Amino acid sequence: MQFPLSFWDVSLWLAITAIILLITAELISPYYGQTNLFIEKGRLRKVALTLGILFLLTVLIRIFEVIIRT
Amino acid sequence: MLMATLTLTRSKIILTQLFVVIVLNVFSLHFFTLLDHIVHNDLYRYGLQFNHEWAGQYWTYSRLIVSSLAIVMLVTSISMAFILIHVRTCGPVSRFVSCLLLMMGIAVTGGSAFFFNRLDYIIHNDLYRYGLQFSYEWAVQYWTYAKLMLGLLGFAAASTVISIVLILAGKLKQEVPLLPRARAFFKIDPTKLICLVLFFVGAIALAFSIYYTSSILAFIGLGLTFWGALLLHVTPSKHVPLELLNATATSTLTNIEKIITDSNLNGKGIYLPPKYLKHFESSLIFIPSKAEQILPKPEEVEEEKLYSKNPDGIFLTPPGLALSKLFEKELGTSFTKTDLNHLQEKLPKLFIEDMEIVEGIDIKTENNTITIEITNHILKDICEEARKYQKLHESIGCPLCSALACALAKATGKPITIEREEQSQNGKTTKIRYCMLEE
């Protein structure tokens, strides 16, 4: 028994989810007049940013691995 | 009352028991998989030869057992939902359906025990014809798992029977008044329910993905778990319709208008800065009786007092005070600790992004005049209502203008008056001009 997704599968998932959430967070921003949507937009933006940062971290790990190999 | 409390307690016991039934079935399933592992791995080390003749039968019974256990869990979960409905409605239909489902669950549990018995017969009879040698090494392990599985199934069936008895012992709607607490306890928030279902289905899919090493299940599980948790996180805890807010504010405005008219006050309301007040974090308006803006001396100002003799006028609590305090709370700082530049910088983010009360805000300062232009604010209806009260509108302004005046008085440390409040022709933009008075 082992987790079937590799590190890069998770990284890809993070990237796609982060992009979806970042675009959503931007589109529903009150700056575009979306003041009638009943969700915590601040929290959504924070989650989107966290996922984006996590994805960037996975990229950094990849770069670090490449540097160590060479 | 006592009867209603008993009904609530009984329902809690039934639900707990049914939850235990589901857990027992999960453990039975686990022990069955361990037993299956013995047959498909260990027995080959004791001379067993694979043959489709015994394997076909074995797999059929094995699938039937797993399916039966899954059906029992599903049926019990649905029955729990009907019990929740029964607690709320005390109707006969939900009681009948939940009992019927539970009885079906007992029958299927019996079926799974029967299928296991058939499977056990294959192992203890047929497999010896395919080279299996008896040994206590595998047999003891096998018997332990088999006994554990059947024992748990027995417990689950007994627990279900007790639940049925408890449900049938309950009263119907006409016999028992429902406690408000009972309603609150079993009140289901559909949004939260959907989020939790997504989350738990995702978690189960993740667990199965690890068990079956399936990347598709892992992606599904990861997605469902994440979106379930995210939706739960971004769902606002409470929201109030704007109409309700407008309705609660109107009476206060009427009272202020009455006081101003009755006191025959002709001056513009002056929002006093903190240095005039005993409580620095509070706000007060002084409305002079004459048009000349004569400020009272700080020692004359008393927040508890309504009428002032020197100069003649009244002290009122601004209609936007609570709103301005809410702004301070959101900003995390008091306006008394800020200045006009800080306000110019922070207010747009606060109003547009954090509180979402306006679509746009522009603050301009020129000598002693501060002009604030607001686009599409949500307090439009209250401000519209305030405009109907002429005196109030001229001297104090609408609650939003008043809240901004409170903030400005605190930030600048100077007395503030609302010079003019204009609305654009399409009603979208409100332009408020404030004046800082020289003392």
Image: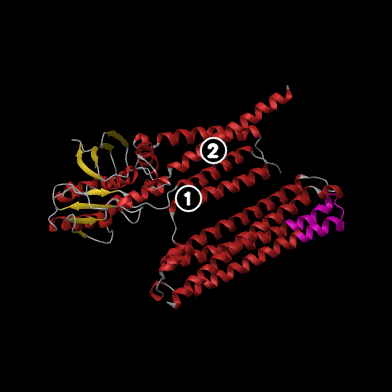
Question: Disc 2 marks which residue?
Answer: A50
State left or right for residue A48 relative to residue B289. right
Q: Which residue is drawn at the image coordinates 69% and 53% (left, top)?
A: B61
Taking B177 as reference, is A64 left or right? right
Q: Are marks 2 and 1 on the same chain?
A: no
Label of residue B194 in the image: 1
Quadrant in which residue B154 is drawn: bottom right
Between B6 and B409, the one lying in front of the other is: B409
In terms of secondary structure, what is the magenta stretch mainly? helix
Q: Which residues are magenta?
A: B119-144
Residue at 14% in and 58% down: B263
The subunit carrying tag 1 is B
| Residue B75 position in % (x across, y down) | 55, 58
How crowded is the residue under tag 2: few (<14 C-alpha within 10 Å), some, or many (20+)?
some
**Residue B350, how many percent across, how many down?**
38, 41
Position of residue B202 measured from the top left corner of the image (x, y, whole percent): 56, 46
Between residues B397 and B121, which one lies in front from this camera angle?
Answer: B397
Which of the image's four quarters has the N terminus of chain B?
Answer: bottom left
Q: Amino acid at mark 1?
A: Ile
